[in-house]
Image (cartoon, rainbow, N blue to C red):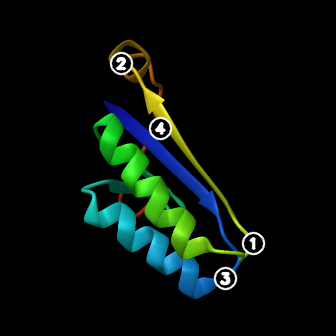
Amino acid sequence: MRCLVVYDIPDDGTRTKIADFCLDYGLDRIQYSAFMGSLTRSQQKELMAKIKRRLGKREGVIQLFPICRKDWEMRLEVINIGKGEG
């Protein structure tokens, strides 16, 4: 199932480690603090458990949103890659 993971973590080291966890699970970075990819339900729970342990008592908000195929196909995007005009 496609999943979106987004987070707001003030501590640089913790934020970097959470990003590493997402990459370890094969998620793709789509924004600085947002990752997207396919995870089974057990992988979702495992990833969030690792994130919770790493966050500990530090400040932060991490959310994982499962997205069904129908909703994924209805997404809208604007993507500009490379140099802009002028």
Q: Which residue is mark 3?
A: 11
Disc with the residue nearer the chain's start (2 vs 4): 2
Q: Report the side of 54 relative to 44 (left or right).
A: right
Q: Which residue is mark 2?
A: 73
**In terms of secondary structure, where does tag 4 sit?**
loop
Q: Residue furthest top?
A: 70
Q: Which residue is mark 4?
A: 78
Which is nearer the eye, 73 or 83?
73
Does the CB distance between marks 1 and 3 fall below 8 Å?
Answer: yes
Q: Comparing marks 2 and 4, which lies closer to the viewer?
A: 2
Distance from the alpha carbon under mark 3 to that under mark 2: 34 Å
Disc with the residue nearer the chain's start (1 vs 3): 3
Distance from the alpha carbon under mark 2 to that under mark 4: 15 Å
Q: Comparing marks 3 and 4, which lies closer to the viewer?
A: 3
Does the CB distance between marks 2 and 1 fall below 8 Å?
Answer: no
Q: Residues within 10 Å of mark 1 (few under 14, many from 20)?
A: few
Disc with the residue nearer the chain's start (3 vs 4): 3
- Residue drawn at x 66%, y 70% is 9
Q: Which residue is mark 1?
A: 59
**In terms of secondary structure, where does tag 2 sit?**
helix
Which is nearer the eye, 81 or 16?
16
Distance from the alpha carbon under mark 4 to that under mark 1: 32 Å
